[in-house]
Amino acid sequence: MKGLKGFLVRFFGNLKSSFSYYPVTISLCIIFAVLFVYRNEYMEFASDAFRERIETIFIGLGIAIFMSMIIQLLTNYHEKAKKYSLIVWLSGLAISVLYYFIAIRDLEMITVVRAFVLMAVMFCVYIVLSWLFKKDEVERFSVKFMIESVISGFYASVLFGGLMLIDFAFETLMDVDPEHEFVIFALAFSFFIVFPMLVFSRIQEEYKQSKILKILVVNIIMPLLVAYTAVLYMYFIRMLVMWEIPSNMITNLVFWYVLIGIFTLFIANLYENGKKWLKLFTNVFPLLTILPLGLMFMALIIRIVNYGFTEPRYTILIIGVWELLVIGYLILFKREKRIIAVLPVSLAVISILLVASPFSMFNVSKISQNNRFSELYEKVDTLSVDEGNSILSIVYYFEDYHDINDITDYPKDMETWEFSENYDLRFAKGPYNYYGTSVIFMKNSQFLEITGYDYILYNFWDEVEIEDDYRFNVFYDDRDLVISIDDEIIYTIDIVFEMEKIIELNQDKETQDHMIMLEDSDYQIVYETDVWKVKIVFGEFYINVIDPNEQVRPSNLTVLIGKK
């Protein structure tokens, strides 16, 4: 009992002390939790515009929370900031509010990515300030924050699970049906209030080296990185033998491999105390990453030359350059001469460059794809299949991630499907009159004639089984659709062949927004035995026109069964 009592005293003491360390940050987390409950429990009839506005406030609160962490450090440890703490806090509030009204107007991809990257940058600033003011090593404080976050997350998860068990027992035993879902309240309390309170109180305690983390980094991650390096070098030898250019897949594989390697070297500074394995790894691993980075840049540049910049490609290029510079820094400077704070500071600068500068990934990608579109649009009437594929992929890229009006030469007020049809842009060769990535064949009528049938089975993908007076089972066997009653197969049909016949009969029809409408005689098959009659109705199916060899399969199929 004493152990449990001591644990509870420390637990609640941590919650209480967090307010003295980070009062504004914790208050903002509580506001976030309350708003989260309101968003999920009390906005059932709210308009879409109001819902979006509430969701943008979540992002604004996230910015304010990280801003408050930085200001709290400044007012605690910087003499001038402490002296003019009110002015500093009001300045931080003004910056957060201005950012919300200027930069968080919607939930588009650019807005969300920019906000989350800014939060990451502010966290890097927070770590560096902790190093400057508390004289705590950057890697030590980073690891401490990570470990305490994991431990606090575990405590919060246990609390959440306990609250849910209590709620389940209460509702079951008392036979009540509450108006609101308790899970939302429990989630908000456990993870948006208790979790940050635990983290901000626990990071104030003295750092104790984690044996588990040391085993994870030194005995597991480092050997895995060495094995991964061997695979990359084997691939390089295969390239030379086969005389191939590097695969596009190598880009992501090397990017994350080097990033994890740098993070591992970052943490390894805590444990390098004369052991041969640690010294060998920290000295040799940076040298071994140079060749894989070269392969990554080669594959990436080939991709950019052929298809231009997109946000992911530009991000990998810029952070890849940062990885190369960091590796060079680690090679040129011995451990005792390294300033490890260079890593988070330089990463923060690179991140700002990526999302909030004239050379941001959004601006560079839009300019690059605009140039590609203009080049292809000049010869739009004579495009090859691959070029037609390219120009449509550019159009869909802008439609999905930006605005179609961002394309300088795009015809005004034209839908994307109209664009593909107007210019006869085919994605693949063949006799069918289709446009875009796929064509959908669907029945013309929304009604289904069921007279004379007793059972209906619909909207299944692989297998459906029902039991009533009889036991029905309908399933796919490769190309065949199989129907059985009481484990006796009554009908088997090559469903792919039937759909291919429908496609052939309707290949000359005009499409409208990628669709071909089918008449009654086209989309249904009727079969009868001595006892049963079966009607198979194709609601819709599609063909992949990028890969016409892909086997067609119905996405909406209805089976009617009746007894004679």
Image (cartoon, helix red, strand yellow):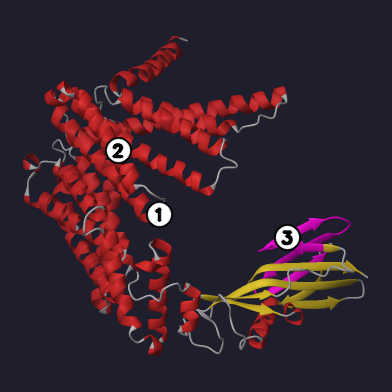
For disc 1, the marked residue is 108
Q: Main secondary structure of the magenta part?
A: strand
Residue 408 higher or lower than 342, as above or below: below
Is residue 449 shown left or right of residue 387? right
Residue 85 versus residue 253 in the image, above or below: above
Horizontal arrangement in the rendering, residue 44 relative to residue 494 (left or right): left
Crowding at dot 1, Cα within 10 Å, few <14 / some 14-19 / many 20+, comes out as: few
Sequence-wise first label, 1 or 2: 2
Identified at 35% across, 55% down, the residue is 110
**Residue highlighted by disc 2:** 96
Q: Nearer the viewer, residue 298 or 382?
A: 382
- Magenta residues (range): 456-485
Q: Residue at x 67, y 26 (%)?
A: 171
User: Would residue 241 be seen by someone viewing this image from the given angle?
Assistant: yes
Quarter of the figure that contains the C terminus: bottom right
- Amino acid type of the residue that numbered disc 1 sits on in the rendered structure: Glu
Q: Is residue 439 magenta?
A: no
Label 2 to label 3: alpha-carbon separation = 54 Å
Q: Residue at x 37, y 50 (%)?
A: 112
Q: Is residue 467 magenta?
A: yes
Left or right of 267 in this view: 443? right
User: Quadrant location of residue 144?
Assistant: top left
Looking at the rendered image, the disc whose residue lies closer to the viewer, 2 or 3, is: 2
Q: Earlier in the sequence, mark 2 or mark 3?
A: 2
Q: Cβ–Cβ below 8 Å for labels 1 and 2?
A: no
Q: Position of residue 555 (x, y in %)?
A: 64, 68
